[in-house]
Structure formats: C-alpha cells, structure tokens
Image: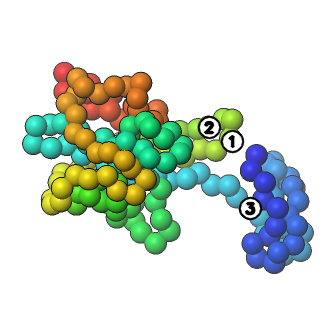
Amino acid sequence: MPQWNFCPRCGRQLVWREKDDGRLRPTCLNCRYTHYANPALAVGVLLTDEQNRVCLILRGEEPRKGYWGLPAGFMEGDETAEEGAVRECQEETGLNVELEGLYQAFSYQHSDHNTSGVLLVYRARIVSGTPRAGTDTVDVKFVAVDEIEVEMLAFHTHREALEKWRGGLV
Ligand SMILES: [Zn+2]
C-alpha cells in the first residue's frame, strides 16, 4: 500500500478509515478529505510505416530500462487521451503522427504494488519528422512483424497489443 501521510487540503495527518463501500482509505479527520488511489491512464500508439513495420522505442529510464516498448506514457491532467498519445509519440520518437482511431484498451494490475491502470493504444500514421531518440528513450526503430523480440518488450500490455497486431497480419 502506498503511504499517504498528510492531507493535501489542510495538512493534518491522514488515518486509515473504513468507508461506506467497505474499503480502507486514507482519511482526514479534520476536513473529511478522503484519498482515492485511482488507476493510472496511459496512452500510446501502434505506429506503422509504409513497409508495415511497427515503431518501437528503447526505454532509457526505469521502470524496465533497456527494454523495448510502444511509444507511450501517462496522460496529463490538461490534455485529452488523443492529445496525450500524439504528445508521447512526438517526445519519444521525434515523429509527428495523426491518430487513426482507438486500437484497443489494455488493462494491467500490479498486485505487488496494489496498483492498476489502463493503456489506451491508438493506431497512428506518420505526418512528419525523422525518428530520433527523445525524452526517456535511447533508440527508435521500425521492425517487421517477425523481428519482434517478445522477451525484450517492457510491459505485458505492449506485448498484448503487438501480439494482437501480429495475429491480424497472418
Ligand atoms: Zn484535511
């Protein structure tokens, strides 16, 4: 369980209290603030080129540094999911892309950290730019479907997305 020690509203110490739904949640006894640990929302792209190769980025930061993944990251509070997917791709690959619709939503859960989230993967095509490593990434490549090294993929959600894509090609 993550520790939420102090109330973000009034600064008093939070205590664990059982709520009406039966769950224990960090609660402020002073101002009645309740902390809800809501799941994270990540956005990414399944970006293919004219040869129908898929864009992968080599992660330069933890978690899963040194593993490959789809261009993806967490959505910011001041953008739409679509804007986030385009932004993450631009930051990580140097490519400006246009989205072609939602590919699929992939759910994940880390039982050891008691966290969960959803990754929205969009189909995308390149509008402009040259592939280059960007923030948090150290390499960018386009790989053919039979060149994907599944064991070198960072996250199971990315693996699921690529396996679905591969399954649709054969
Ligand atoms: Zn408070």
> Which residue carries the number 1 mark?
114
Crowdedness of circle 2 by 10 Å Cα count: few (<14), some, many (20+)? Answer: few
Q: CA distance from mark 2 to mark 1?
A: 6 Å
Find residue 146 and report its horizontal and vertical position in percent.
23, 23
> Which residue carries the number 2 mark?
110
Which amino acid type is shown beneath numbered disc 3?
His
At horizontal 59% and vertical 44% (from top left) the residue drawn is 116
Which tag is nearer the camera, tag 2 or tag 3? Answer: 2
Residue 95 vs residue 80, the one in the foreground: 95
Q: Give the farthest residue toward the bottom.
A: 10
Q: Can you say whether 91 is above or below 145 in the image?
A: below
Q: CA distance from mark 1 to mark 3?
A: 15 Å
Find residue 138 and report its horizontal and vertical position in percent.
37, 47
Find residue 163 and report its horizontal and vertical position in percent.
33, 28
Name the N-terminal-most of marks 2 and 3: 3
Q: Left of 6 or right of it: where is 87?
A: left
Mark 2 near mark 1, Cβ–Cβ under 8 Å?
A: yes
Residue 17 vs residue 49, the one in the foreground: 49
Q: Which numbered marker is on residue 35?
A: 3
Q: Quadrant of residue 153 in the image?
A: top left
Residue 21 vs residue 154, the one in the foreground: 154
Q: Can you say whether 41 is above or below 33 in the image?
A: above
Which tag is nearer the camera, tag 1 or tag 3? Answer: 1
At horizontal 88% and vertical 67% (from top left) the residue drawn is 13
At horizontal 87% and vertical 72% (from top left) the residue drawn is 12
Find residue 63 and report its horizontal and vertical position in percent.
54, 43
